[in-house]
Image: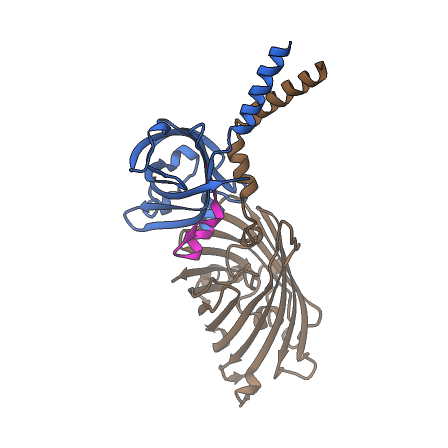
Amino acid sequence: MKSIFTILFCLLFAMFINGQNRYLTKSGAINFYSKAPMEDITADNNQVLSIIDADKGKIAIQILMKSFLFEKALMQEHFNENYVESDKYPKATFAGDILNFEAINETVSKQKVKGNITIHGITKEIVIDANFTKTDDSILVDGNFIIEIDDFNISIPAIVSKKIAKRIKVTFDFNHKPYHK
Amino acid sequence: MKKLLLSIVLISIHTLFYSQNDLLDILDDETPENKTENIVTATFKGTRILNGHSIENRKNEELEFIISHRFGAINLGFKELFGLDQSNIRFALEYGLTDNLTLGLGRSSFEKTFDSFFKYSLVKQRKGQSVFPFAISIFGSIAAKTQDEEFPIVERTFSENLSYVGQVLLARKFSSSFSMQLTPTFIHRNTVRIAEDPQNIYALGFGSRIKLSKRVSFNSEYYWAFNKSTSIDAKNSLAFGVDIETGGHVFQLILSNAITMIEKSFIAENTGDFFGGDIHFGFNISRTF
């Protein structure tokens, strides 16, 4: 009986300890770029939240869609109203695992991140290549990937099909700092 | 002892399940409160509901060129190609000096009228902690008629040809597919045709938007005037139409008993009887630079 108690206690203790080693940013940068025959559209969001659990090698990202800034106000309104429907789906999220987290150190290395991305209420599994650098007081992550907007049930009407690309390039850059709750 | 053991097990299970999503939950907790996030946007698609202004402003430093057309009445019959032979057109340039202040200059072919206006957004509809149930804007315009009086021929000075309009725009977006606006209106005319015509006209406007699909909405608008000009047998203006959004523009197709597109005319000087068939087809096209 006593030994069970000790094991459980250790387990519980381990769980509380676990997750102390986290890194967070509230000012992560995400850019997306749509290249179409008639128009190039780009938007920036510099208020992206990202957190890394360095014990488990997990990463989670949260993006407020209304924080994307466009060159033209009308584009931004259309983006929120017609395409990503920000009132219904205010956030895009990603949660996943950094596959070879132990290998990350002071020099830049390319690692695969595998997880679930949710945009416009639709979740898909993706694998992204990202560059990681870990120092004592920060974890830097940057990279880019392509998303197909058809995958997320975002429809482009025929009349603007020459202005909006079906494949969107997403670029990200996060500088995580130690996070203590 | 058993109770303690049980509680430890329960806590462990809880921690285990909680940790499945805990990173995203932490991000939820850490999300800073974003003030602009709670402002309700796109109550209406365009800066006009149909004939009259909506609470929507042009954004900061945006210039919009608006071409509006109203054809003749449909009941003129085949000889006038159901009104298409006649037309009243208004060109306007409207500029967003700030996100909340729009200035505009326009010219209508009807009575060769120039108009200028400002529209200022006082209060925005908000959700969240500092909730406010509706939006308030104010609107003011001066219109100058430059066409000579012919029936009878009278010489009028520039100031005699001026009219003033003041409006308070009260709008609420009830849901993503339904918005409504109330528009108390005051119109002052420096000159009226006969002494019985009121120089000051008071009216209340009702406007609504029902979203039919992502890019198409059905709008209706009615201006109820409390006092009317008797010399021209003025009628209240009624309009129905659709907004169609095509990327950079909003395209509005309109059926209205008013042939004019500025407030002092379609509220105070409209003579068309909608249910008598005096219906004018028209459109507003805007292009933003």
Q: Residue at x 42, y 39 (%)?
A: A155
Q: Position of residue A5 (x, y in %)?
A: 62, 14
Toward which corner of the image does residue A102 lie, by quadrant? top left
Q: How is the image coloured?
A: by chain
Q: Nearer the viewer, residue B222 or A62?
A: A62
- Residue A65 lies within the magenta run: yes
Q: Which residue is the extreme one toward the left?
A: A37
Q: Nearer the viewer, residue B200 or A176?
A: A176
Instruction: Spot the brown chain and give its letter.
Output: B
Q: Residue at x 46, y 30 (%)?
A: A123
In magenta, the rendered stretch is: A60-77
Q: Nearer the viewer, residue A21 or B261?
A: A21
Q: Nearer the viewer, residue B10 or A41?
A: B10
Q: Position of residue B191 (x, y in %)?
A: 61, 84
As drawn, A9 above or below B245: above
As drawn, B68 above or below A55: below
Can residue A118 be seen here? no
Locate the N terminus of chain B by quadrant: top right
Toward which corner of the image does residue B137 lie, by quadrant? bottom right
As drawn, A144 above or below B83: above
Locate the C terminus of chain B by quadrant: bottom left
Q: Is residue A11 left or right of residue A132?
A: right
Instruction: Spot the blue chain and give its letter.
Output: A
Can residue A45 be seen here? yes
Q: Which residue is the extreme one toward the top?
A: A1
- Residue B185 lies within the magenta run: no
Q: Position of residue A174 (x, y in %)?
A: 39, 43
Q: Position of residue A19 (x, y in %)?
A: 51, 31
Q: How many marks?
A: 0
Toward which corner of the image does residue B135 lie, by quadrant? bottom right
